[in-house]
Image (cartoon, rainbow, N blue to C red):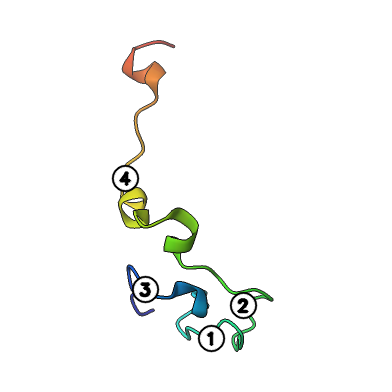
Amino acid sequence: MAAIPLHPANPERICWGCERYCPADSLACANGTVRTQHPVELFGEDWLEWSNRTPAEPAWIAQGED
């Protein structure tokens, strides 16, 4: 699968569900009845920073509690 643009200018115009990148009003792959949104639409401009975070250690483990 091709890499997706990190910050597309108009992500709402394209379905991001597969490598076809169909126009939002002409879905060809039958990936559903609605277009798949780009991560920037779902999580905001800092979506890539958010997705690269490692899970924090739970507080009870850090404190040594059972």
Helix, strand or loop under label 2: loop
Q: In the image, 25: left or right of 16?
A: right
Residue, disc 2: 31
Disc marking residue 53: 4
Residue, disc 1: 23
Residue, disc 3: 8
Badge 1 crowding class, 10 Å Cα cut-off, few under 14, some 14 to 19, many 20 or more, is some
Residue at the spot 39% in from the left edge and 79% down from the top edge: 1
Q: In this view, which residue lies farthest toward the right?
A: 33
Helix, strand or loop under label 4: loop
Report, in whole angstroms, how far the alpha carbon at label 1 lies from the one at label 2: 13 Å
**In the rendered image, which quarter contains the C terminus?**
top left
**Relative to residue 18, is residue 59 depicted above or below?**
above
**Relative to residue 15, is residue 62 depicted above or below?**
above
Which mark lies nearer to you, 1 or 2? 1
Q: Position of residue 31 (x, y in %)?
A: 62, 77
| Mark 3 or mark 4: whose residue is earlier in sequence | 3
